[in-house]
Amino acid sequence: MRIDSDNGAEIPCLLDVELKAKSNWSVRLGAQEWAKYTYQRPPEDALEWLGSARRGMQSGALAKRGAEFVLVVGDHVTPLSHADSKQLAAATAHAGTLEPAHAVQPKPARGASPVVVVIKRRRIPVTQ
């Protein structure tokens, strides 16, 4: 759900989370988003994957480690400040849980193969 900042109404949305007007964070939730920045860790890893986050030139996979939020790019884990964590916690609390979105398009029906015409060119030997 997306929360409209003007009137506080909930707008249905799958991946986007809009933050307060003063916040510079852009958050998108879901596995497709965090997979752009890193890979799935083993189950014993303490990271809970949420999505992706961006603020200015700083971007990465958004994860939660205990009570703090972190940005992950590859194997590099960057803890976020307390103020940033508060903003992101408020944003993700409004988002609720996401159902996995399967954006799989059906395969198009395979018709007849295209016709390919090969035109051989005549080669004229040049003698000097």
Image: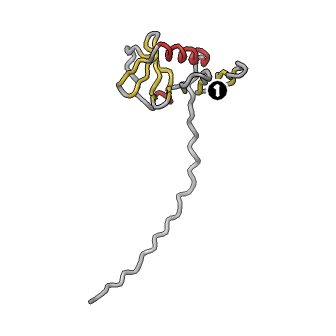
Which residue, as the protein is rendered here, is positioned at the far bottom? 128
Residue 28 in sight from this viewpoint: no
Helix, strand or loop for disc 1: loop
Quadrant in which residue 74 is drawn: top left
Query: Up-down: is 127 above or below 95?
Result: below
Which residue, as the protein is rendered here, is positioned at the far top? 67
Query: Up-down: is 31 above or below 109?
Result: above
Give coordinates of residue 26: x percent, y percent.
Answer: 55, 27
In the image, what residue occupies the spot 50% across and 21% down? 50
In the image, what residue occupies the spot 61% across and 16% down? 94
Quadrant in which residue 91 is drawn: top right
Image quadrant where one finds the N terminus: top right
Which residue, as the protein is rendered here, is positioned at the far left? 128
The residue labelled by disc 1 is 13
In the image, what residue occupies the spot 53% across and 60% down? 114
Q: Amino acid at mark 1?
A: Cys
Query: Up-down: is 44 above or below 12?
Result: above
Quadrant in which residue 10 is drawn: top right
Give coordinates of residue 75: x percent, y percent.
Answer: 35, 25
Residue 118 in sight from this viewpoint: yes
Which of the two residues, 24 or 91, is positioned nearer the viewer here?
Answer: 24
Image quadrant where one finds the C terminus: bottom left
Which of the two residues, 1 or 98, is positioned nearer the viewer here?
Answer: 1
Give coordinates of residue 56: x percent, y percent.
Answer: 49, 30
Q: Is disc 1 surrounded by few (<14), some (14 to 19) or many (20+) residues within 10 Å?
A: few
In the image, what residue occupies the spot 50% across and 17% down? 84
The colour scheme is: secondary structure
